[in-house]
Image (cartoon, rainbow, N blue to C red):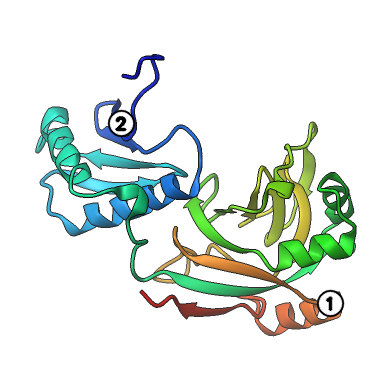
């Protein structure tokens, strides 16, 4: 522990009877998210008896294990050994990541809160579309709903607070914005984030071998298109709405 009583990172915490949480910071940053993604990828490459699964959040890695095969203390020691191998905050991002270019309609009746968000960011709508539509963002984590990504980080001008009241419902494929991040909705749901864009991506595909379209570490850009072009793309490609994906060279 530090002199102020705060944990020194990274820190390993016990989570119930079957879990340990490796945390790299108490808030999201590019280095802490990079560390979480890289450390999880490294965990998947090592053989740890009793480790059942891993998952990442914005700045942490959760490890679930079978306590009949490995104890908390035994697993903690192995996690600490791996932590000591390198500076995870500067580690290369995992291989196999992909880059998605996603046609997106900003504003109009399909994404009715663009003007409000633009005003809060000190821009007009055209400037906001240029800014949001040119931002290359990382899938920071998958969570809240199946295959639903948190994406970031955007520029400081987009450090907008959540709304004080909920929007009753946004549709699947809605691109919403707050706190320098996007969330891309996988299913219709209420939200406290502003609905600034609309995509035709179908993120959760339970009929496929890999039902999640996105992976943590993927990168995306939400390219502006006219409403008529968006509707045409969504009709012609109901899974991706015209999105194009390519592997990111390591």
**Residue 239 in view here:** no
Vertically, is 38 above or below 11? below
SS state under label 1 = loop
Q: Quadrant of the C terminus?
A: bottom left
Residue 14 image offset from top left, x and y in percent: 28, 26
Mark seen at residue 5: none
- Depth check: give the residue in front, 213 or 193: 193
Q: Which residue is mark 2?
A: 11
Q: Tell me if residue 198 comes above or below residue 91 in the rendering.
A: below
User: At 84% across and 52% down in the image, what residue appears?
Assistant: 118
Residue 79 in view (yes/no): yes
Quadrant of residue 95 within the rendered picture: bottom left
**Residue 139 percent location from the top left of the image:** 51, 58
Label 2: few (<14), some (14–19) or many (≥20) C-alpha neighbours in 10 Å:
some
In this view, the residue farthest toward the front is 3
Picture coordinates of residue 52, whole percent (x, y): 22, 47
Residue 107: horizontal and vertical position, in percent? 85, 62
- The circle on residue 226 is 1
In which quarter of the view is residue 38 placed?
A: bottom left
Question: Which of disc 1 and disc 2 is earlier in sequence?
Answer: 2
Q: Residue at x 26, y 40 (%)?
A: 64
- Mark 1 packing: few (<14 Cα in 10 Å), some, or many (20+)? few
Give the Cα distance between marks 2 and 1: 47 Å
């Amino acid at each position: 522990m530090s002199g102020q009583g705060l944990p020194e990172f990274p820190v390993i915490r016990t989570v119930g009877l079957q879990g340990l949480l490796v945390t790299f910071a108490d808030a999201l940053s590019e280095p802490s998210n990079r560390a979480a993604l890289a450390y999880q990828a490294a965990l998947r490459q090592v053989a740890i008896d009793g480790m059942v699964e891993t998952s990442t959040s914005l700045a942490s890695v959760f490890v679930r294990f079978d306590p009949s095969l490995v104890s908390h203390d035994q697993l903690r020691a192995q996690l600490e050994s791996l932590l000591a191998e390198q500076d995870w905050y500067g580690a290369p991002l995992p291989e196999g990541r992909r880059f998605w270019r996603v046609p997106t309609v900003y504003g109009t009746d399909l994404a009715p809160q663009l003007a409000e968000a633009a005003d809060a960011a000190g821009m007009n709508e055209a400037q906001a579309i240029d800014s949001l539509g040119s931002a290359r963002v990382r899938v920071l984590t998958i969570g809240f709903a199946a295959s639903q990504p948190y994406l970031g980080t955007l520029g400081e001008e987009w450090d907008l607070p959540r709304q004080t009241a909920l929007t009753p419902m946004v549709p699947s494929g809605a691109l919403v914005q707050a706190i320098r991040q996007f969330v891309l909705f996988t299913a219709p749901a209420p939200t406290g984030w502003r609905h600034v864009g609309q995509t035709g991506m179908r993120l959760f595909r339970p009929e496929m071998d890999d039902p999640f379209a996105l992976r943590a570490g993927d990168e995306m850009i939400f390219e502006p298109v006219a409403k008529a072009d968006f509707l045409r793309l969504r009709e012609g490609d109901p899974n991706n709405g015209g999105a194009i994906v390519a592997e990111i060279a390591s």
